[in-house]
Amino acid sequence: MSTAAPISLVTGGNRGIGRETARRLAGLGHTVLLSARRPQDAARAVAGLAPGLPGRLLPCRLDVTDADEVRALARRVEEEFGRLDVLVNNAAVNYDTSRRAVSADLDEVRHTLETNLFGAWRTVRAFLPLLRRSPRARVVNVSSESGSLELMSGGTPAYGVSKAALNALTRKLADELRAEGILVNAVCPGWVATDMGGPGGGPVGEGAAGIVRAATLPDSGPTGGFFRNGEPLPW
C-alpha cells in the first residue's frame, strides 16, 4: 500500500530527542514509525503523543543490534507503505562520562559501538531499497560534538569514538548515495536535558529542531555535513 504522506522511521523514538523528533515529524503530516527496543515503550510513547497531530504515529519494536528485527521491520514497511522517505538513526547508548580511554573496558566500548555505529549502519543497509523508492529520501544520523575530531578531548571514550565513527559513516554514505539524490547528514542536537544527557541541558525541542530540519531538506540541501542548529560543525 502506498501513501502520499512522507513515511519516516525514528529509531530509539520512545523518549527524549527521538520522541520529540517523532512528534514534530507527525506534526508536519508524516506517518512516523516510532520504534523502541520494547514494544510497550513504543506504544506508551505513541499514546502520549498521538492526539491532535495531523500525521500518524505507529509504534514498532526495533532493537538496532538485532539484524533479524531490523530486516523484519523493513519487510513490514515494504508491505504497508512500499517505501521509506526519512530514516532518523537516533538510537544510542552509554554516555560514559566517568570513563577514560586509558582504562576503558573494551567490552563496554564494543557494546556501545554495536548500537551507536553498527546499529545505524545495519538499519541504513536494510532500508536502503525502500529509501531508493522515495522521491526525496533523507537519512539523519544523530551524532554529537563528542565525535568531532577537531573538538575532541579526553573522557567519554566509548560514546565519543562511536560518534566519530558514525560521522565517518555519514561521509561515506553521503558520497556513495549523492548521485541518487539521497541526502545523508549528521546532526548534533547539543546538550539537551534527557535521560542520557542529564539535567542542566537545553529544552528537548531545541535538539529535535535540527534533526527535523535535516529530515526535511529540499533537494538542493546539503549532504555529507555535520550540523548543530542548522550550522556546520567541524569534523
Image (spheres, rainbow, N blue to C red):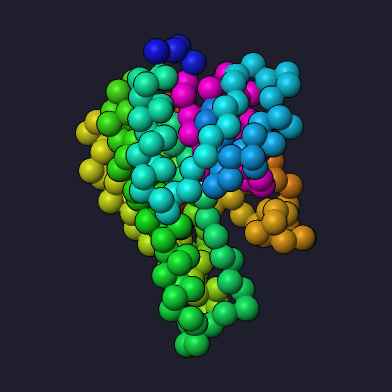
Instruction: Say left or right for 24 vs 93.
Output: right
Question: Which residue is nearer to you in this view: 97 or 40?
Answer: 40
Instruction: Determine if the magenta segment contains residue 203.
Output: no
Residue drawn at (37%, 21%), measured in percent from left and top? 79
Q: Is residue 233 above or below residue 42?
A: below
Q: Quadrant of residue 161?
A: bottom left
Q: Which residues are magenta?
A: 6-31
Residue under the point 30% across and 23% down: 133
Q: Is residue 50 above or below residue 145?
A: above
- Residue lying at the far right in this picture: please name it: 200
**Depicted 100 relative to depicted 201: above or below:** below
Above or below, 149 against 48 in this view is below
Residue in the foreground of this view, choosing between 33 and 16? 33
Q: Quadrant of the C terminus?
A: bottom left
| Point 77% across, 60% down: residue | 200
Report whether 42 appears left or right of 186: right
From the top left corner, tell me how far across and down residue 44 is, in percent.
69, 36
- Label tally: 0
User: Is residue 67 left or right of 229 when viewed as pictured?
Assistant: left
